[in-house]
Structures are given as structure tokens and as C-alpha cells.
Amino acid sequence: MAFAVREAVPGDAAAMLRYAETLFAEPGLDLPVAPGEFHLTIADEEAVIADHALQPNAVFLLAVAGDGAILGMLNCHGSARRALRHSCEMGISVAKDHRGQGIGKALMQAMLDWARSAGVRRIELKVYARNDHAIHLYRSFGFAAEGRRRRAVHQDGEYLDDLVMSLLL
């Protein structure tokens, strides 16, 4: 499937919320959001997009199909503190029916291109320790595990560990 990666704009807010609602309703999803917990409004999402656009160490990327459907999202956001501005934390997701088609790789590459041009020198993330596919993707881009957070998430009646990973640019 053909898609393009681009930065989110406020006009994407409604489509982003629909994407997120579908994603969060997915059974067994490795995201710490339970069904019914996600309550952003279009105005809230527009504010998130605007905040990312205003910060020099933040970006919100979308993978968008030719028909305008959102296939994946990646956000990377850093601190306003001078001592921490060189670092940002990222999160990524790809729609269930479109996984394994290069969307995650394209989002990651676009984020790394942005990070280098923005002067970001450290990117970190958290990933469920059981999410082998995501861990493989991150390692393929040079991310390394820095630690394990034991019982970091309680989901579907069980405690799950996650890994903290980072990439130094």
C-alpha cells in the first residue's frame, strides 16, 4: 500500500482520534491504555499537535494512505529545560492491518532525519519486554536497552515488564 510520512497538522485531529480509538480497542495491544480510558477531544488533540509544532525538540509524524487514512503515528517530545533539551522520548504505533509493511520503518527514519536536523542527541522509549517485533525494529535503528522496569504495567490482570531503550545521535 502506498503511503506518505508527514508532520501532523491541526486539521488531522479528528482522523488521529479515530485512529487512536481503533488502536486502543485492539485486544492485547501493547500500550498502557485500557478501552474507554482515552478521552481527548478534537480541541485537545489540536492542542497536542500545536504544542509539538512549537517545540524545537518535538515532532508528531503521521503515515497517511492515499485516501487520507492514518496508518501509523510517531511522536517525539523533549523537555523545555536547558539541561534536557537534547533528549526526547518517542512513541510509535501502526494500525493492525498495516503492520509488517514498512510503515514503522518509514516513521522511524523520518523521525531520525528530523532529530538530526533539530539537534536532538538522545532519543529514548519504553517498550513492553514481550514485544519482540518492536524491539527488533528499534534495534535495527541502533537503539540499545538501558534497563528493565519490572512490573511497570498492570494490564489484563497481569503485571508486565518494559524495557527502556535509547539511541545516541
Image: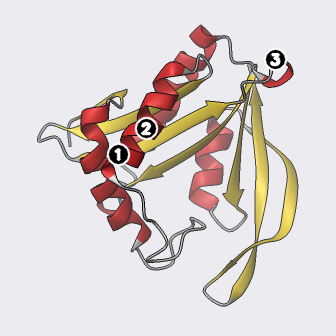
The number of discs equals: 3
Q: Quadrant of the N terminus?
A: top left
Callout 1–callout 2 Cβ contact below 8 Å: yes
Kind of element beneath mark 2: helix
Q: Nearer the viewer, mark 3 or mark 2?
A: 2
Callout 1–callout 3 Cβ contact below 8 Å: no
Kind of element beneath mark 1: helix
Residue 106 visible in this rendered orientation of the protein = no
**Residue under numbered circle 2:** 47
**Residue under numbered circle 3:** 82
Residue 36 is left or right of residue 4, and the answer is: right
Residue name at image x 45 percent, y 77 percent: 35
Determine the CA span between mark 1 and mark 3: 29 Å
**Residue under numbered circle 1:** 43
Determine the CA span between mark 3 and mark 2: 23 Å
Q: Amino acid at mark 3?
A: Arg
Residue 157 is left or right of residue 137, and the answer is: right
Q: Position of residue 25 (x, y in %)?
A: 39, 74
Residue 49 visible in this rendered orientation of the protein = yes
